[in-house]
């Protein structure tokens, strides 16, 4: 065979996609023209059944939206981790491949009992072949570049972190002062950290109190935005002292401790319905300047106030508890406790009222006109402190095996002989009753006031003898004493009366110079009467002494004669004196008009000796009457009244002196 | 009329079967760290200054016919305040209790006596076993009593130093409270307080049976 | 079958260790992924960082295993496929933890390919292009300088760490505060009178008991 066969022409015809519409009898084919774009579109559109799809969509949208929402959420949530997730997925795939290849190539026999026939060799898919290969030279510059880039990225992260730390450290002074303020708070108040919060305690438990209120507060760091929102309470606090520096710490105290509180004790006169005396007591009274100053931050003030409220409440709670249980009454009426007021009538018409004042917004105003009963204030404070310390300072057991909680006396009492009275006495000594103390003190106060007033009234009434009252400095809260001196001016060396008045809550005791002691009741009229009689007897005594010095003799002294001629005259004593030679007698009576002032009525009867001459012609002229009876001559004289106002002398005694001296000559 | 044996004319209506149990935990601390412990105790306990005490304790044994362990009675006298009365304390066996019990429990009865009870106990059959002087500080928190003390030997006794070498440089710390056996919170109180003292000192239950047999 | 004896043993041993290390890495990766997927809501950065730290530790141990002296140079041992089959093989399943059931001609190219991913290849090309233009001497200088700087920084870090460690160590040791022997002795002495003998001279006086 030579030469190539001639090329054969092959004709190709592509498959026609178009459909044949019809084939005419002459073999011509009519094709259905392929749909043009618009036509195909309309065709498709005709196939869409809009109604049906909408229905499907409605039911599906809910599911779809919910799933899509879930997915979206899922996506959104994962978004922070998305990158990491994809990277980790890729690495998982790579690692899987690596481990699979290695383990297949290694083809370690797995522990399967069934297929023991498989030897590793026959089933091996891959193995390691040995082919030595030269080590490739290390591309240092390439490595360097990659390492540099990686180090750069890592150091950038570290630097940004360090920058942030630096910035935070040298940030605005707000952060610094927060910590320094916290330190200051800790220096003054007990604070501790509980989890995320900082809590503190302002109750008096460590001092020995057993009040139920926890007194805890929370310390909150103030952010910059709300540093200026103070409510009424705090605004009032800040008004008190204007120099309040702003601080980044806010203290939240329980709402029943927010406010101003104080305890007020008032003694009211019910007949006039006004307070005679009152005092208000709050912790701020005993604060000394070392504890707080005008520059204290707001939180300190808030805490101090809260503690004050707690203190007042505790004191009031103790008082009311005891008042309700009070059995032995020293009062005129039972003690009534209503809400925040304790009232009782300590004397008829005198009421003692103790009130707990609490206001959320305004500090309790003290009425400046009313004087303050300092002693009651002090006493209540001391009682509470004593109670606390008694609870806290239990005498420890010596030896340590002894029982806890007994006092030394009780320990000794356990092993020594005792009588019931002794035990009762020791028990009584150790109990403190707040209400008792309060009542006794207020009674004492009241009685003392009365004594004071009576003395003042009397000394104003009697201008004649000078009445001096000297109150002793040595007095206790239930007893005080005064020394009354009555003297006539100019005649002090002549005679002076002195009397000691001891004022007790339930009675007034008088000690006289002659060692007699009288007990008067607290009724002011008693005292009034006594003083009047004292003055009267003083005057009469002075007269006696005076007459003695002038040489007159005392004939008769009576401290009290019967009632005078009219019932409204009370006699307070009378004296009868006669002169040296017996010629003159003077009778002095001291009378008090009931309802009126005291007046002295002095009757002087002076009988001069009858002149002989006068007696002539009378029966006395008989020579039978022997005139040894000259001593009888003074008898039978006429009593004459002394013209008192015209007598020379400033006061009674001086006038008496004038009288006596003039009568002799 | 014969009165029942447990008739107590002076006690009145108080039920006489109120036993008192002592709940306690013991431990020791080296002398060097005793100061730190004292400071911590002062902060934790009631707000009173710590009370120094010096006690002379005499331990009396009575051989018991029924059980191996003798009956132990301690006579304690305070040397710091000699006018306070002597105390006699009877301690029962220490129950370590199960693991869920927080403290060791033993029954105890403490009575004050007027004079030295030596002769009284002697007549009952007790014999003086040993005596020891405890000197230290006493703290109190509520009803818990805490003592930190150092042991020394009174002049009337001889001391076997070989057995006491380790304790010469340590203080003994004991936290206890007395309560009735029905009171369940006493043990927890003691335990909670001891937790606060960690890690300065760890107070645990000590097995007394082993110690007793080391006689 | 062409495995030389001792070398083959060495290879097997090292490959075993490689397998274990890579399995560790794989497991921790899977755990991490699972954690992200399930707990993405509560995941915090510190735990993520912990996982990353774990991974980096494991990878570095894998690399050290590869670089260690015991492993013969791995480049001398290419993996050669021996057999292909379309059947499922349970042995294979077990070997690969259920991922590969059939070793057929479809898997082998995938599993044995050495061409890196397109992105990786692109990055490599870029890097080579950057580097290739520099002269050798300059690149040597750069490399040396870089090494020096790295060393200096390393030293600084080491010093700082030593100082920091010293402070930390001083305060971390808890001092011994009590001696348990002392506890036992003390309690025994106080309660039971151990170690102290009383010289009791008790005179037997009157026998009356004072109550």
Image: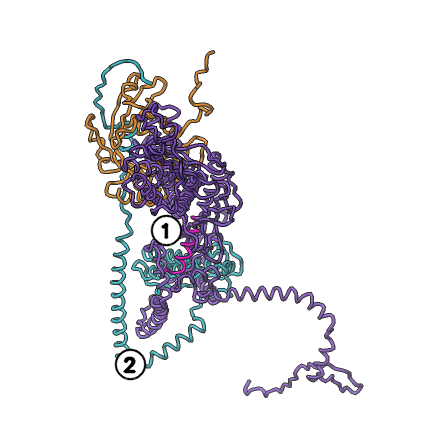
Would you place residue B54 above or below residue A647 in this image?
above
Whether residue C91 is visible, yes or no, is: yes
What chain does mark 1 sit on?
A
User: In the image, A617: left or right of A18?
Assistant: left
Which residue matches tag 1? A286
The secondary element bearing badge 2 is classed as loop
In the rendered structure, does residue B61 fall within the stretch colored magenta? no
The secondary element bearing badge 1 is classed as loop
Location of residue A629 (image quadrant):
top left
What residue lies at 42% left-to-right and 27% top-to-bottom? Answer: B19
Task: Look at the image and tell me in which quarter the N terminus of chain A lies.
Answer: bottom right
Q: List x then y, in percent, for residue B138.
A: 30, 37
Would you place residue A655 above or below residue C21 in this image?
above
Rendering colour (chain C): cyan
Q: List x then y, in percent, for residue A501.
A: 36, 39
Q: How are the colours assigned in the image?
A: by chain
Rendering colour (chain A): purple
Q: Which residues are magenta?
A: A295-311
**Badge 2: residue crowd in 10 Å (few <14, some 14–19, many ≥20):** few
Secondary structure predominantly adopted by residues drawn in magenta: helix
CA gap, disc 1 and disc 2: 90 Å
Near-viewer residue (A240 or A157)? A240
Which residue matches tag 2? C135
Q: List x then y, in percent, for residue C23.
A: 42, 57
Task: Look at the image and tell me in which quarter the C terminus of chain A lies.
Answer: top left
User: In the image, B189: left or right of B161?
Assistant: right
What residue lies at 24% left-to-right and 14% top-to-bottom? Answer: C205
The chain displayed orange equals B
Near-viewer residue (A184 or C23)? A184
Farthest front residue in view:
A617
Q: Are marks 1 and 2 in contact (CB under 8 Å)?
A: no
Q: List x then y, in percent, for residue A412.
A: 32, 27
């Amino acid at each position: 065979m030579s030469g190539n066969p001639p090329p054969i022409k092959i004709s190709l015809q592509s498959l026609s996609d178009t459909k044949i519409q019809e084939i005419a009898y002459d073999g011509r084919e009519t094709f259905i023209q392929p749909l043009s774009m618009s036509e195909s579109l309309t065709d498709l559109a005709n196939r869409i059944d809009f109604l049906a799809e909408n229905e499907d969509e409605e039911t599906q949208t809910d599911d779809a939206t919910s799933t899509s929402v879930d997915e979206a959420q899922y996506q959104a949530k994962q978004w922070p981790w998305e990158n990491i997730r994809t990277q980790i997925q890729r690495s998982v795939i790579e690692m899987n491949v690596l481990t699979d290849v290695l383990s297949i190539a290694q083809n370690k026999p797995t522990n399967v009992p069934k297929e023991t026939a498989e030897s590793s060799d026959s089933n091996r898919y891959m193995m390691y072949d040995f082919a030595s290969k030269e080590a490739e030279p290390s591309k240092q510059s390439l490595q360097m570049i990659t390492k540099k880039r990686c180090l750069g990225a890592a150091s950038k992260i570290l630097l940004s972190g360090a920058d942030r730390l630096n910035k935070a450290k040298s940030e605005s002074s707000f952060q610094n002062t927060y910590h320094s303020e916290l330190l200051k708070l800790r220096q003054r108040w007990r604070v501790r950290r509980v989890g995320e919060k900082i809590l503190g305690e302002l109750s008096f438990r460590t001092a020995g109190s057993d009040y139920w209120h926890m007194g805890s507060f929370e310390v909150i760091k103030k952010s910059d935005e709300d540093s200026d929102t103070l409510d009424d309470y705090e605004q009032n606090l800040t008004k008190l002292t204007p120099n309040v520096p702003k601080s980044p710490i806010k203290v939240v105290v329980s709402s029943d401790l927010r406010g101003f509180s104080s305890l007020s004790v008032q003694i009211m006169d019910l007949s006039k319905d006004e307070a005679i005396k009152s005092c208000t007591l709050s912790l701020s009274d005993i604060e000394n300047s070392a504890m707080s100053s005008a520059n204290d931050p707001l939180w300190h003030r808030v805490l101090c106030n809260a503690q004050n409220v707690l203190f007042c409440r505790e004191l009031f709670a103790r008082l009311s508890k005891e008042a309700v249980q009070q059995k032995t009454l020293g009062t005129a009426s039972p003690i009534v406790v209503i809400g925040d007021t304790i009232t009782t009538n300590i004397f008829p018409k005198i009421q003692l009222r103790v009130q707990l004042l609490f206001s959320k917004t305004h500090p309790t105003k003290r009425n400046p006109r009313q004087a303050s009963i300092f002693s009651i204030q002090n006493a209540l404070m001391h009682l509470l402190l004593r109670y606390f310390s008694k609870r806290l300072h239990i005498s420890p057991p010596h030896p340590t095996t002894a029982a806890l909680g007994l006092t030394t006396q009780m320990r000794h009492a356990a092993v020594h002989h005792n009588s019931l009275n002794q035990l009762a006495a020791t028990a009584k000594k150790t109990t403190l009753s707040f209400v008792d103390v309060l009542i006794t003190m207020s009674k004492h106060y009241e009685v003392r006031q009365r004594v004071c007033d009576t003395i003042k009234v009397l000394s104003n009434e009697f201008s004649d003898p000078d009445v001096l009252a000297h109150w002793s400095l040595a007095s206790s809260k239930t007893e005080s004493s005064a020394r009354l001196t009555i003297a006539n001016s100019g005649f002090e060396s002549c005679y002076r009366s002195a009397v000691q008045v001891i004022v007790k809550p339930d009675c007034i005791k008088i000690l006289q110079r002659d060692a007699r002691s009288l007990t008067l009741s607290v009724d002011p009229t008693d005292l009034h009467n006594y003083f009047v009689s004292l003055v009267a007897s003083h005057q009469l005594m002075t007269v006696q002494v005076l007459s003695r010095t002038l040489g007159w003799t005392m004939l008769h002294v009576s401290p009290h004669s019967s009632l005078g001629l009219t019932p409204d005259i009370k006699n307070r004593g009378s004296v009868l004196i006669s002169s040296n030679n017996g010629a003159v007698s003077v009778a002095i009576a001291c009378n008090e008009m009931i309802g009126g002032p005291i007046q002295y009525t002095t009757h002087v009867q002076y009988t001069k000796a009858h002149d002989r001459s006068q007696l002539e012609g009378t029966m006395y002229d008989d020579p039978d009457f022997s005139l040894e009876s000259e001593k009888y001559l003074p008898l039978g004289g006429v009593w004459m009244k002394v013209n008192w106002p015209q007598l020379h002398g400033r006061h009674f005694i001086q006038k008496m002196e004038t009288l006596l001296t003039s009568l002799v000559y | 009329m014969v009165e029942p044996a447990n008739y107590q004319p002076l006690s009145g209506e108080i039920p006489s079967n109120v036993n008192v149990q002592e709940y306690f935990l013991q431990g020791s601390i080296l002398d060097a760290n005793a100061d730190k412990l004292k400071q911590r105790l002062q902060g934790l306990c009631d707000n009173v200054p710590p009370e120094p005490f010096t006690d002379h304790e005499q331990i009396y044994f009575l051989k018991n016919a029924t059980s191996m362990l003798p009956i132990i009675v301690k006579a304690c006298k305070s040397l710091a305040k000699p006018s306070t009365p002597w105390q006699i304390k009877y301690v029962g066996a220490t129950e370590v209790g199960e693991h869920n019990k927080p403290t060791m429990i033993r029954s105890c009865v403490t009575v004050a006596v007027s004079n030295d009870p030596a002769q009284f106990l002697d007549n009952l059959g007790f014999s003086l076993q040993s005596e020891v002087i405890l000197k230290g500080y006493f703290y109190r928190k509520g009803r818990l009593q805490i003592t930190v003390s150092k042991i020394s030997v009174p002049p009337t006794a001889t001391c076997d130093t070989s057995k006491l070498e380790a304790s010469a440089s340590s203080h003994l710390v004991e936290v206890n409270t007395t309560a009735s056996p029905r009171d369940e919170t006493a043990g927890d109180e003691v335990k909670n307080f001891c937790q606060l003292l960690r890690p300065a000192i760890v107070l645990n239950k000590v097995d007394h049976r082993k110690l007793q047999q080391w006689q | 079958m062409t495995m030389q004896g001792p070398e083959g043993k060495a290879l097997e041993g090292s490959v075993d260790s490689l397998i274990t290390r890579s399995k560790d890495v794989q497991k921790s990766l899977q755990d991490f992924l699972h954690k992200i997927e399930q707990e993405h809501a509560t995941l915090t950065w510190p735990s993520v960082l912990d996982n990353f730290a774990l991974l980096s530790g494991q990878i570095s141990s894998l690399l050290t295993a590869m670089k260690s002296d015991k492993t013969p140079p791995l480049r001398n041992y290419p993996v050669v496929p021996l057999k292909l089959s379309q059947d499922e093989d349970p042995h294979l399943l077990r070997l690969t933890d259920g991922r590969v059931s059939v070793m057929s001609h479809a898997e082998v190219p995938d599993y044995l390919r050495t061409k890196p991913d397109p992105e990786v290849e692109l990055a490599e090309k870029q890097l080579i292009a950057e580097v290739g233009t520099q002269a050798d001497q300059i690149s040597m200088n750069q490399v040396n300088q870089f090494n020096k700087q790295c060393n200096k920084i390393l030293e600084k870090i080491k010093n700082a760490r030593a100082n920091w460690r010293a402070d930390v160590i001083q305060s971390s040791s808890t001092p011994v505060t009590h001696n348990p022997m002392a506890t036992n002795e003390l309690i025994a002495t106080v309660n039971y009178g151990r170690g102290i003998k009383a010289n009791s001279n008790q005179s037997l006086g009157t026998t009356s008991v004072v109550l």
